[in-house]
Amino acid sequence: MKMHHVHNYYNKTTFDQGHTHKMRGVTSYEIPTGNSHVHSYNGVTTVDRAHVHHYSGVTGPAIPLAGGGHTHEYQGPTTIDQGHCHHYKSLTGKEKATP
Ligand SMILES: [Fe+2]
Ligand SMILES: [Fe+2]
């Protein structure tokens, strides 16, 4: 059976309008692109100041880690809610193999 993988991710958004939100989740399985691969992700931020934001995107290509394995950079804006949005830019966790 061919093994596939996903990545956990966790980050805080930028500080806007006096608050931040946290984002946490698991990416999609790998999506082949050229000689590398990317992952899609989407979710809802934590509740802060009585609202949430939604987000979705596609990571960059695989970035090898010195100790083995790889990570992906991901970034983007959240949706606009209550008149503002936030931005985020981070690296996913190391890959997790799944059947
Ligand atoms: Fe990956
Ligand atoms: Fe917000």
Image (tube, rainbow, N blue to C red):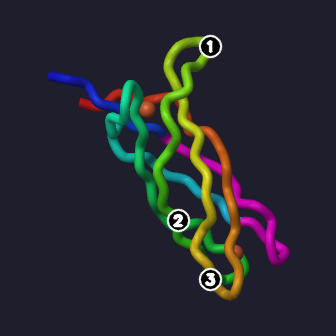
Looking at this view, name the residue that lies furthest to the front.
Answer: 34
Q: Secondary structure at mark 3?
A: loop
The reply to whether the residue tagged 3 has its Cβ within 8 angstroms of ligand 2 is: yes
Left or right? Give the position of 97 relative to 58: left
Residue 3, by quadrant, is top left
Instruction: Give, as a three-letter code, the residue at label 3.
Output: Asp
Marks 1 & 3, CB-CB < 8 Å contact? no
Q: Secondary structure at mark 1?
A: loop
In which quadrant of the rendered image does the C terminus lie? Answer: top left
Distance from label 2 to label 1 (Cα)? Answer: 30 Å
Distance from label 2 to label 3 (Cα)? Answer: 11 Å
Instruction: Identify the residue shown where x is 54% and y is 36%.
Output: 72
Residue identified by numbered label 1: 66
Residue identified by numbered label 3: 81
Instruction: Give, as a three-letter code, the residue at label 1.
Output: Ala
Instruction: Give, as a three-letter code, the residue at label 2.
Output: Tyr
Q: Position of residue 62 (x, y in %)?
A: 49, 29
Left or right? Give the position of 62 relative to 97: right
**Magenta part of the chain:** 8-20
Left or right? Give the position of 60 relative to 20: left
Let me know if residue 45 is in the magenta part.
no
Looking at this view, name the residue that lies furthest to the bottom.
Answer: 82
Q: Position of residue 60 (x, y in %)?
A: 52, 40
